[in-house]
Image: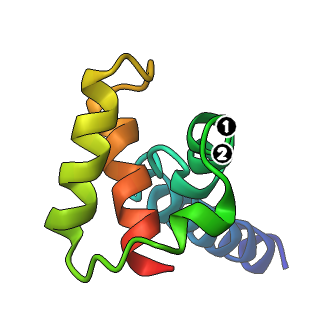
Amino acid sequence: MKKSIILSLTGVLLVAGLAIAAGCSAGPAGPDGAALYAQKCLICHSESSMANYDYETLAEWQDLIDRMQSKGTGYTDEEGQAIAKYLHER
């Protein structure tokens, strides 16, 4: 009886440890492109004006974001990449 309880607890701890390890290995998600777009871009640009851009590649969106960043938008390179990715994928 005592041995089966110890084995059960060991199994539970093993499964919990594996679940924690799997969660930790994913790493941070990075900036949220959609939230940054709403916070940084829609201050000056309307949603309808953004629909006028017919960019097809991520590189085209990134070029636009880089130009905006050079005008002092206040976001980091990583945030700019997240915004470009969001605009490309939407």
Query: Where does the image place residue 78, in percent across and percent down from the top left?
Result: 31, 37
Disc 1 residue type (three-letter): Gln
- Residue 52 in view in this figure: yes
Residue 50 falls left or right of residue 26: right
- Give the residue type that dot 2 points to: Leu
Q: Are marks 2 and 1 in contact (CB under 8 Å)?
A: yes
Image quadrant assignment for residue 55: bottom left
Reply above or below: 23 against 55: above
Task: Give the residue pinned by disc 2.
Answer: 42
Q: Secondary structure at mark 1?
A: helix
Q: Position of residue 23 (x, y in %)?
A: 52, 59
Count of marks overlaid on the render? 2
58 or 22, which is in the foreground? 58
> Left or right of 1: which side holds 64?
left
Regarding residue 10, the answer to whether it shows in the image is: no
**Residue 28 rendering spot, x and y as whole percentages:** 45, 45
Provide the residue designation for mark 1. 39
- At a point 51% along the width and 53% down the height, the residue shown is 33
Residue that protrudes farthest toward the right in the picture: 1
